[in-house]
Image (tube, helix red, strand yellow):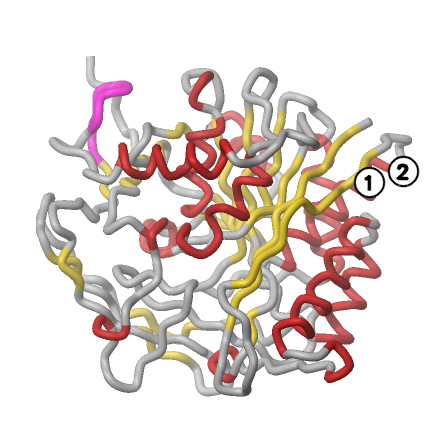
Amino acid sequence: MLKKNVSVRSRCRSQPWERGAKASQVRKGQRVDPECKPSFMARGYPWSGLAGSSALHEEAISEVKPQPKHALGSETSHVGVLNVASDWQLACLASLLEVLAGHCTTLVKRLIRPLVPTFPRLCHAGPQLNAQLEGWLSQVQSTKRPARAIIAPHAGYTYCGSCAAHAYKQVDPNITRKIFILGPSHHVPLSRCALSSVDIYRTPLYDLRIDQKIYGELWKTGMFERMSLQTDEDEHSIEMHLPYTAKAMESHKDEFTIIPVLVGALSESKEQEFGKLFSKYLADPSNLFVVSSDFCHWGQRFRYSYYDESQGEIYRSIEHLDKMGMSIIEQLDPVSFSNYLKKYHNTICGRHPIGVLLNAINELQKNGMNMSFSFLNYAQSSQCRNWQDSSVSYAAGALMVH
């Protein structure tokens, strides 16, 4: 029997979990950072302005020219062009044409057999990716297990894979049955949150099924938009957590579902509303929340160059700034976190998903639930020592319910 109307999102691309373009892959005048995926539409980092409801000038795209579609198995991925409104900041814009060396890059809607791959071939990097994830996880201790929520980065695994392992090691596959993945929107302006239009996310490890029952419950609230297929395909903040999620849950791979949620530029009041909505799911010990966020994006291309000379080298100032924010997150205080962002304008791209999580925790604490959050690892893509340098920071942490 064929299962009708099942949408499949293929994540078999040119390995976005290995992002980080070489200089030779970038056209003259374009800039690439550890967060840029060579085979994807480039993302903008509008780091200016105040952090709050429309904080840091959340990126707005005035027009997205459609990507040309190519045949299944095509060796070439055509990348669209972004036209950006003049009052919004994009720090990174690259239109790249990359040979995929046998990897498929397609998001399709078609009939499939249950648990049978639609595509005639899978990405060749599956075994290599699996071994890489196993290596990182094997070097980390399970000190905060079972986690009810984690914060982990979404850059290329070359830069943040070892850091993310500290968060995913705290996931207990024996009790986890539903995984909410909250990622910030890097491409499209959203004032609310959005849900995926597909039913299955394909990874090089195995397929991840979206929980349509939970989606139905969320949709009925009227608080959500629907992601277009193009937005779903382009966004990396959720995507980069799919292989790690699959790996952490592989011993129970047929026993869990995922709930991907794209989080927009929420006002503080909307962070409270979504926090209250998600709090009932956070209260369930069989649920896990994955909050996708990198920390400080520092340098001229990010239009952010905060520097506290008393900390010494620039990279130490960045670390001090990040750890101030991390300490506030550990206090589980959404108001203090919002005030921190307004004061320092730190370019934490997942600030709104973090705000939603903190508000959900705050809602549960009102009802007497005892919770604690601890950061377990911190890293930077490089150490900035002068004004021409740039870096992205990463942090991994876990929430426990006592």
**Residue 94 occupies quadrant:** bottom left
Q: Residues within 10 Å of mark 2 (few under 14, many from 20)?
A: few
Q: Which residue is mark 2?
A: 366
Residue range highlighted in magenta: 110-117
Q: Amino acid at mark 2?
A: Lys
Whether residue 156 is situated above or below residue 4 in the rendered picture = below
Assign the N terminus to one quadrant of the image. top left
Overall secondary structure of the magenta stretch?
loop
- In percent of width and height, residue 207 lies at 33, 29
**Residue 85 occupies quadrant:** bottom left
Q: Which residue corresponds to the image point at 45% horizontal and 87% vertical from the top-left?
A: 86
For the question of whether residue 93 can be seen, the reply is yes
Whether residue 397 is situated above or below residue 309 in the rendered picture = above
> Is 207 one of the magenta-colored residues?
no
Q: Which mark is residue 189?
A: none
Q: Which residue corresponds to the image point at 35% horizontal and 73% vertical from the top-left?
A: 63
Q: Tag 2, which secondary structure?
A: helix
Q: Which residue corresponds to the image point at 30% horizontal and 40% vertical from the top-left?
A: 9
Q: Which residue is mark 1?
A: 363
Q: Residues within 10 Å of mark 1 (few under 14, many from 20)?
A: many
- In percent of width and height, residue 257 lies at 48, 26
Q: Tag 1, which secondary structure?
A: helix
**Pointer 1 and pointer 2: residues touching (CB < 8 Å)?**
yes
From mark 1 to mark 2, how far is it between C-alphas?
5 Å
- In percent of width and height, residue 184 lies at 54, 56
Assign the C terminus to one quadrant of the image. top right
Q: Amino acid at mark 1?
A: Glu
Q: Is residue 206 left or right of residue 88?
A: left
